[in-house]
Image (cartoon, grey):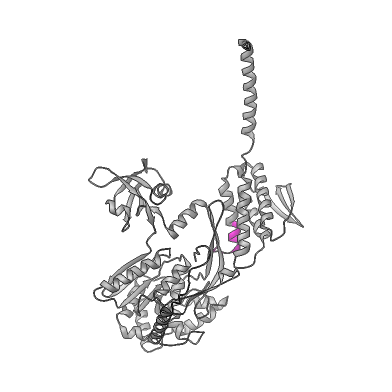
Amino acid sequence: MFERPLAPSRLCGAMAIAAVVLGVAFAARADSPPRFPASDSERLFAKAYSSLSAFFIKPVDVDPLAITGLQALRSLDPDFHIRREGTTVQLWRAERRLMAEEAPLRWDASGWSTLTTEIIARTYTDSAKVQETEVEQIFELILDTILSYLDQYSRYATPDEARNIRARRSGFGGIGIRLKLINGKAIIIEVMPDGPAIRAGLAVDDRVLSVNGIPLTGLEMSSIIHLMRGRVDTEMELRVLRRNYPPRTYTLKRTKVVPATIYVQPYNGIAHIRISSFNAQTSDSLVSVLKALMETAVPPMRGIILDLRGNPGGLLHEAINVADVFLNEGVVISTKGRHSKSSRDFKADGREIAKGIPVIALIDGTSASAAEIVAASLQAHDRAVVVGSNSFGKGVVQTVVRLPNGGEMTVTWSRLVGPAGNTFNKIGVMPTFCALGEQDGVEIQIGQLRSSELPTLAALARWRAASNEIGVERDQVRSICRGEEKDGTLGLRLARRILNDPALFASHPGGVACLPLGRIRCRSRWQRSARWGARARQRNRTGERKDRSPTGSARPT
């Protein structure tokens, strides 16, 4: 049975009513504030609070972290403030109290994550200024504030930042080129060896016009990098312009790319090896470079300059592996922390590649963390002469905590202790030769070394004694060789001078190793080399091998 159709007048009336109803619904929806992702927030802060409570180098309760982080909401809307009164946590806006909730127990990460989320959600509902802020920016603001409250090295990385950090640390899917924006044009400034780009014939100064059909004109470098990188074994299409040639399209397959950190320049039997940072490939690259030089260098390699200047650090286990390239035995570095997995002795495993070749380690005020581990270890074991100026003084280790939103927290969880029992946080590594000032000063130091009157020996003793202290003594010691080279080449020239004079290198006192300051006894390099070699051969016969792989996450230092 068919229903009778509405008359035209009744039909128009019904449509008008429907339009009014829909209009009211849309208006209500438009006026309502955007919804805050409470479940995402709770998961994020529960993970952050529990990790900080478990891993941070000093015991820390959750409640001051949460209160400190929530106070940062005032930077978005100054009318908001948090009060802790008795057993309650209160949210106020100007003179009006919006919330008063019972405070969770001081160690209750789950309870504080719930309360943190409820307070953020309320500010999100009540303030247009907070609503105008991206949710990820709110998370970043609170976590940055919390981690800054803990110490200067703990930090938060947003999902995008964390992705880039992981790429530098462990590699990424790419084609092996470096780009630079020059007058808005994406120009290739480096083509990495053995990568898809060099095999396809791409060259320095080529201009990349588009990636997968998307023009690069007007894009920021971060957007270009996002287009260039992807999963390993996926294909990408590049439109490239070369001077005096028409544009050409290349189809390339991404491979795993680990940024280069080893740069070598052999000269007259001396290998100048610069390590820019420590990523997952650093020690393997160093071993490859050294083996190639030892087999093919003409004249034969008779000295190594290990240039750690400007090196900000990187992965802990890579620093240990690099030191191991020059050592046969002994503690490379120890870590001491509150968490059970943060305290370890990392030892050389007897695989020394450099085979007793004389080594100079160059450092300066920007050599930090992993770079300081290598310099301090080689100096303490009398394996290298350290030349330059006082290093940065970052003697702590961080562990990386992955968060549910894809971001990362880098959390300080242990301090570094050198082979002789000294720490170097806030004091750094002191060189045997201070390469500051003029060339005349260097000549004076060389003369003092020949006569065994090098004044830095006394300074090294003071440095070692002050490394575990605070205050005036530490600052005075640090000022002994602090500053920058005037022309940037004095340290390198001094290193070459020492290596070119075998008698001069042999006369060096070995810095800390030959001072009566700790477990390390004063023995000649050659005595130690023979002793270490015998022990290494014995271990190889018995199949013993020490495990140096760090537990847990990769630990940037």
- Stretch in magenta: 145-153
- Left or right of 363, for residue 465: right
In this view, 228 is above or below 445: above
x and y percentages locating residue 110 in the rendered image: 67, 55
In this view, 335 is above or below 208: below
In this view, 427 is above or below 63: below
x and y percentages locating residue 394 in the rendered image: 51, 69
Most extreme residue toward the right, as rendered?
Answer: 86
- Left or right of 420, for residue 67: right
At x 40% / y 66%, what residue is drawn? 282
Of residues 239 and 491, the one nearer the viewer is: 239
Q: Is residue 39 magenta?
A: no
- Left or right of 455, for residue 401: right
Q: Is residue 148 magenta?
A: yes
At x 40% / y 64%, what residue is drawn? 281
x and y percentages locating residue 225 in the rendered image: 41, 50
Q: How many marks?
A: 0
Q: Quadrant of residue 529?
A: bottom left
x and y percentages locating residue 376 in the rendered image: 46, 76
Question: Does any portion of residue 487 appear in the rendered image?
Answer: no
Question: Does any portion of residue 323 appear in the rendered image?
Answer: yes
Of residues 231 and 525, the one nearer the viewer is: 231
Q: Which part of the image, by quadrant, shows the N terminus?
A: top right
State whether the magenta stretch is mostly helix, strand or loop. Answer: helix
Most extreme residue toward the bottom, as rendered?
Answer: 451
